[in-house]
Image: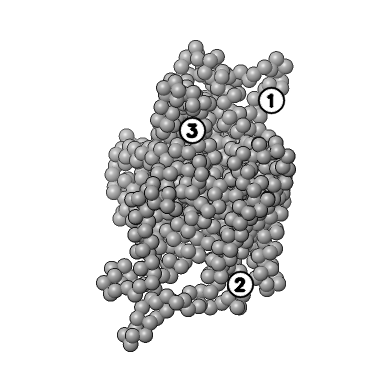
């Protein structure tokens, strides 16, 4: 019936039944592709230089984590929320406001180990409140309400000078410095980002098998029946928003450390929609999708200009390319690149009855 | 009306008092103490009129949005793009022919044509898949925004107001009394009043068309249950195309209006998409009177907010939405 609807039919049966006996939380332990990817990600600093390491891979992992929070809500909860970037941006603003930055009149100058938990807590509260509003309605209404929340936050940051410093935003945000390491220099920062992304990935993967995640998927598939079974449907949905907000908040903290500044441009409506595009292009059926989508998006964003110029077109038409790609994915593959990959695998194996849950999971 | 008073006496009292206060604020000459606390009456009246006329513009955009949603359950997130497209078409026509009226007609038909194409080529293929349709409209809005940026650039355009509408008009509302005892009347731009009247007329015409004609009856039946309607032999696809064309055309007209008393630039599409979202969330999805009420509330909140609490004008709009969602999630005037 819908994108998320299609998703549940294909993937979650194996996830909840066939795979459960496997070691919980380590689903890919016997998948060679996953090991290869993990090793490549770990030794990335040996392969890639600063530009690729930060601008491509670290950015991919950060954007992927924001999109992961959307995937968690949409894939397991059936709630497409367009405010995940707003939550990340809120966390980023809070780091800048509570921590140290170039705008001394705004920033409170707390050390990072106080500012970050504060930012995460506030972002989680913000996202949970937004979610509590959004769960009062269903389906497409959720999209509209979360989009309205995101847009309101964008215009608010533009207008408010006391906390958010208007449209100039907050610049030269300090990054952590301890144990004699500058954690914003390329290689340590890459490992921080990788660690957080991996943590979020496995956390989402674990939650999807935990009782809470299973109940959430039940709520997505049939809220009435779950209510009849005694589950509090809205509480599960709000809790899902809380989890997703925390993940988005983590990514937001990394984002502000990455760019060292935050401004309304980073939380614009277009950027909110970009997160949806990333998640849908990658596939919102499983946690790896958002990262694939983010990689595609970042590569396109970085190289589309050169590529378009090279084939004799106007390089500024990058968003057109993104939009058309998104349309194509929505038209032909309801679960993104993962879906295409699965169908291709299925096509190769004549015994295809259902795509195996463990395949291509890494 | 009487039923409402009987069922909610407290609310009715609050509404009556609010209306009385508002009427007094509009018609009375303000005592000096009041002017000292909240500023000149002229400022208040101007903000009020700006809010009402802005509400008229919002109604034009949101009514098409809510009509399309009501019948087809299609959240057309490309509605803002249709608005901007109509505005650009109107600008091109008015700049080349100099006729303001003609720009409305052409903008209506061009955006209606785009709407028909969208319905026939895109949405008909994925009927009943709400979320997928919404995703497609997001993709389309990105593509349209970039195409329009390509064609028109990032400049600001303003559609020329025709000569017979330029200039202010004096309204029989006293803003202040001079020391000589001579009253000072409010002067207000004529074009905004004309546009507001036009949107009221369009609104009434739509209401009449929906409630008094055969096609309106079919549309209302479709809003209630489109499967049964199709089963009774109505050619529902043609109704869909018509409604989509009308909704899109209204967005196009709104684009010309917006281009006349504000300006057109990339980013306006998102602004008006957001405005129509908030308006229909407040007023109730799929309800034309709801869109009118929501547009009035949001327009007033935005303008009065930007005069009296400038930093938080957006937050006021947002708070209204939150309040409505908290108290009446289906919107103020939705039937459910």
* Circle 1 chain: A
Q: Nearer the viewer, residue A222 or B215?
A: B215
CA separation in Å, label 3 and label 2: 47 Å
Considering the image in quadrants, where does the N terminus of chain A appear? top right
In the displayed structure, would residue A214 be above or below residue B33?
A: above
- Where is residue A133, by image quadrant? top left
Circle 1 residues within 10 Å: few <14, some 14–19, many ≥20: few
Disc 3 element: helix
The image shows residue B203 at horizontal and vertical percentages of 57, 59
- Where is residue A325, by image quadrant? top right
Residue for point 40% across, 43% down: B326
Considering the image in quadrants, where does the C terminus of chain A appear? top right
CA separation in Å, label 3 and label 1: 27 Å
Q: Which residue is mark 1?
A: A344
**Lower sequence index among marks 3 and 1:** 3
The answer to whether B54 appears left or right of A245 in the picture is: right
Is there any visible trace of residue B19 in the rendered image?
yes
Q: Which residue is mark 3?
A: A73
Determine if marks 3 and 1 fall on one subunit.
Answer: yes
**CB atoms of marks 3 and 1 within 8 Å:** no
The residue at the far top in this view is A21
Determine if marks 3 and 2 fall on one subunit.
Answer: no
Circle 2 residues within 10 Å: few <14, some 14–19, many ≥20: some
- Where is residue B38, by image quadrant? bottom left
Q: Nearer the viewer, residue B172 or A51?
A: B172
The image shows residue B181 at horizontal and vertical percentages of 33, 85
Q: Which residue is mark 2?
A: B160
CA separation in Å, label 2 and label 1: 56 Å
In the displayed structure, would residue A10 be above or below residue A114?
A: above
């Amino acid at each position: 019936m819908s994108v998320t609807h299609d998703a549940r039919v294909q993937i979650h049966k194996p996830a909840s039944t066939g795979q459960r006996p496997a070691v919980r939380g380590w689903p890919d332990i016997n998948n060679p592709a996953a090991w290869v990817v993990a090793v490549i990600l770990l030794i990335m600093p040996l392969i890639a230089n600063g530009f690729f390491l930060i601008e491509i891979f670290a950015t991919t992992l950060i954007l992927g984590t924001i999109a992961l929070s959307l995937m968690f809500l949409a894939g397991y909860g059936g709630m497409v929320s367009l405010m995940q970037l707003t939550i990340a941006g809120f966390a980023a603003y809070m780091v800048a406001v509570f921590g140290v930055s170039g705008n001394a009149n705004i920033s409170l100058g707390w050390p990072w180990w106080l500012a970050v938990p504060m930012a995460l807590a506030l972002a989680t509260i913000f996202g949970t409140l937004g979610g509590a509003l959004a769960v009062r309605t269903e389906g497409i209404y959720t999209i509209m309400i979360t989009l309205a929340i995101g847009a309101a936050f964008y215009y608010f940051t533009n207008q408010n000078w006391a906390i958010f410093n208007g449209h100039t935003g907050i610049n030269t945000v300090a990054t952590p410095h301890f144990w004699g390491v500058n954690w914003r220099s390329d290689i340590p920062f890459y490992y921080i980002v990788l660690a957080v992304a991996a943590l979020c990935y496995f956390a989402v993967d674990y939650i999807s098998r935990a009782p809470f995640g299973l109940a959430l998927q039940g709520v997505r598939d049939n809220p009435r029946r779950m209510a009849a079974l005694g589950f509090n449907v809205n509480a599960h949905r709000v809790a899902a928003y809380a989890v997703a907000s925390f993940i988005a908040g983590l990514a937001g903290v990394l984002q502000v450390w990455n760019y060292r500044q935050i401004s309304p441009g980073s939380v614009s409506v277009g950027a909110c929609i970009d997160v949806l595009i990333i998640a849908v292009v990658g596939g919102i059926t499983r946690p790896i999708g958002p990262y694939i989508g983010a990689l595609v998006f970042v590569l396109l964003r970085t190289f589309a200009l050169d590529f378009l110029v090279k084939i004799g077109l106007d390089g500024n038409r990058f968003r057109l390319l993104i939009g058309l790609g998104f349309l194509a994915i929505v038209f032909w593959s309801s679960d993104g690149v993962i879906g295409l990959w699965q169908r291709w695998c299925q096509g190769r194996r004549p015994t295809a009855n259902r795509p195996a849950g463990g395949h291509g999971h890494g | 009306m009487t039923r409402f008073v009987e069922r909610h006496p407290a609310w009715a009292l609050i509404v009556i008092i609010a209306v009385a206060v508002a009427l007094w604020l509009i018609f009375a000459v303000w005592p000096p103490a009041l002017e000292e606390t909240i500023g000149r009456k002229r400022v208040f009246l101007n903000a009020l009129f700006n809010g009402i006329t802005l509400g008229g513009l919002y109604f034009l955009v949101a009514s098409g949005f809510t009509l399309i949603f009501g019948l087809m359950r299609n959240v057309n997130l490309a509605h803002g793009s249709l608005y901007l497209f109509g505005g650009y078409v109107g600008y091109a026509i008015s700049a080349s022919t100099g006729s303001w009226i003609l720009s409305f007609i052409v903008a209506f038909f061009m955006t209606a044509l785009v709407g028909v194409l969208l319905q026939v080529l895109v949405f008909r293929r994925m009927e009943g898949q709400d979320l997928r349709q919404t995703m497609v409209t997001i993709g389309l809005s990105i593509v349209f925004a970039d195409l329009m940026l390509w064609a028109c650039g990032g400049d600001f355009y303003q559609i020329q107001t025709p000569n017979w509408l330029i200039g202010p008009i004096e309204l029989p509302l006293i803003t202040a009394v001079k020391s000589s005892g001579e009253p000072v009347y409010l002067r207000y731009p004529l074009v905004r009043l004309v546009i507001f009247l036009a949107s009221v007329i369009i609104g009434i015409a739509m209401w009449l068309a929906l409630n008094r004609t055969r096609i309106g009856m079919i549309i209302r039946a479709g809003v209630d249950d489109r499967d049964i309607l199709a089963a009774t032999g109505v050619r529902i696809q043609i109704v869909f195309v018509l409604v989509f064309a009308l909704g899109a055309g209204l967005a196009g007209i709104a684009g010309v209006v917006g281009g006349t008393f504000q300006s057109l630039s990339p980013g306006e599409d998102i602004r008006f998409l957001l405005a129509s979202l908030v308006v229909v969330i407040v007023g109730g999805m799929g309800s034309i009177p709801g869109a009118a009420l929501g547009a009035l509330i949001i327009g007033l909140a935005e303008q009065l907010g930007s005069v009296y609490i400038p930093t938080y004008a957006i937050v006021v709009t947002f708070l209204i939405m939150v309040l409505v969602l908290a108290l009446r999630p289906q919107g103020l005037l939705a039937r459910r």
